[in-house]
Amino acid sequence: MGIINALTSVVNVFAKYDDLFLHALLMTVMLSLATVLISSVLGSLMALMKISGNPILRGIATAYVSFIRGTPLMVQIFMVFYGLPLLGINLPTFEFMGSDFSRFFSGLLALVINSVAYVCEIVRGGIQSIDEGQMEAARSLGFNKRQSMTFIIFPQALKNILPALGNEFVSVIKESSQVSIIGLAELMYITTTVRSISFRSFEPLLIVSILYFILTSVCSLLIKKMEKKLSVSNRSSN
Amino acid sequence: MEREFILEVKNLGKSFKDLEVLKSIDLNVKKGDVVAIIGPSGSGKSTMLRCLNRLEEPTKGEILFHGENILDKKVDINKIRMQIGMVFQQFNLFPHLTVRRNITIALTKLRNMPEAEANATADRLLEMVGLAEKADVYPASLSGGQKQRIAIARSLAMNPEIILFDEPTSALDPEMVGEVLQVMKDLAKAGMTMLVVTHEMGFAREVASKVIFLDGGYVLTEGAPEEVFEHAEHERVKAFLAKVM
Ligand SMILES: Nc1ncnc2c1ncn2[C@@H]1O[C@H](COP(=O)(O)OP(=O)(O)OP(=O)(O)O)[C@@H](O)[C@H]1O
Ligand SMILES: [Mg+2]
């Protein structure tokens, strides 16, 4: 089979199932975006716990981060999927973007639980990269700890945090493919579906890799732009 | 009746774990005093200064500011810090804010001063330190001497009763030391109460009303500059002075 034939075949498969793919693409984007938005908030809170003076809060955050980062995402996904019902949480199963809601929720929850640990480290790193003298200068003017964080430390840390959060988004896009195992109709799941109904195994995989690649490339490009913009306005050094 | 001393330090001690840096420090400061704090490296000069606004938490003793012990649990240290300014060796200007905003941020956020009034205050202070034209730039574009003058203006904005200086000229290129010392001299002349950790013996001799020599966790010698510099009796003080002068 020549290369032309192969390409034609790929185009044909995509043309036939394009709405399935595009729908799944949207699902992947929504899932990843929701994950990063939610875990940005929760991860920041966890970062504050991790740098707080309270040893209990610090302990909880440290244990959580090590546990999540030290276990496979796949295991976490299964644990959420099978664990929720055990906890007596049975979500309604209405349709949500071509996938039942309880699966969407389980997938989102598992991704959030995972991503929070990584975001926590990003935010903590961003805050701790700010010179200690900044906090001391703020405190010596009479700002309390919280005000110093809000007005002085966090605005500076954000310049490190935002690009890193962008990279986390790219990671989540790729890792979200793993929630296909619980039947959430995102890109990877649909690829499997198309493979079985079209009796073509390679073409759907090629299509999905291209879609993932476009997605992550666009994101990386946007992050680079943002980094440039931030570094122009970055008046680092005293 | 006004107290004789604005600041009274009694039996102040500070340990880091097993390291007892300050053993027992006593010090009285009158309004308008300029106290130069000298001593060998590692003798605890910075630690002592930082105890005075509780950037370091003392392990024992009392620090009375207008007769009130600021180590008391009931004291709102943030209120006290508004009245005791601090200038750092590394300037510690806020790099994400313009020079003017560096000076006004505490006024608007902590004193709830209207922005226009805070800006006017900033411009007046910038005029005073000779940097009126730098109001709208960011700190990164300034020289070390300019940064330190802005840092002094920033601490002056809160209208403090005392300013603590920790080696304010040590991070500067030699040619910029003079401009910062000049601002400090002007402040001293205007009656500002200042405690200055310094290696600038010339400045100490010329401007200080009192010099204290710190070593081994104690104030070994204190007195007027000429007493300390010319008639030092303590061997350690003599040895130190011989080395730095
Ligand atoms: N946060 C800290 N933790 C542990 N040890 C400390 C800390 N800060 C200071 N020290 C120690 O306390 C001692 C006194 O330090 P300090 O910085 O007060 O000295 P200094 O007189 O200001 O010295 P220099 O002239 O070099 O600035 C030193 O031995 C230093 O290592
Ligand atoms: Mg020091």
Image (tube, rainbow, N blue to C red):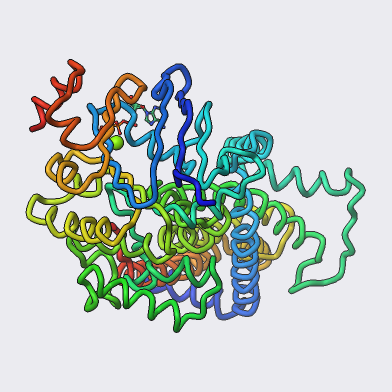
Residue B181 point in image, percent of width and height: 18, 54
Taking the view exactly as shown, the residue that stands out farthest to the front is B1
Residue B98, given in percent of the width and then of the height, sits at 34, 72
Residue appearing at x 68%, y 67% in the figure: A197
Query: How many marks do you count on the picture?
Result: 0
Q: Nearer the viewer, residue B132 or B24?
A: B24
Q: Does residue A2 appear anywhere in the picture?
A: no
Q: Is residue B47 above or below residue B7?
A: above
Q: Nearer the viewer, residue B221 or B59?
A: B221
Can you tell which quarter of the image residue A32 is in?
bottom right
Q: Is residue B165 above or below residue B72?
A: below
Residue that lies at the very extreme toward the right in this rendered image: A88
Residue at the far bottom: name it. Answer: B116
Camera-side residue: B135 or A170?
Answer: B135
Q: In the displayed structure, would residue A46 be above or below residue A39?
A: above
Residue B204 falls in which quadrant of the image?
A: top left
Q: Locate the N terminus of chain A and report the quarter of the image it occupies.
A: bottom left
Image coordinates of residue A102 in percent, x first then y, are: 82, 61
Residue at 62% x, 39% y: name it: B72
The image quadrant that residue A97 belongs to is bottom right
The reply to whether residue B219 is in sight is yes
- Which x, y percent locates residue A101? 81, 66
Q: Is residue B79 left or right of residue B204?
A: right
Residue pictured at 33% horizontal, 56% vertical: B192
Q: Is residue B93 left or right of residue A200?
A: left
Quadrant location of the C terminus of chain A in the rendered image:
bottom left
Answer with the quadrant where ligand 1 appears in the image.
Answer: top left
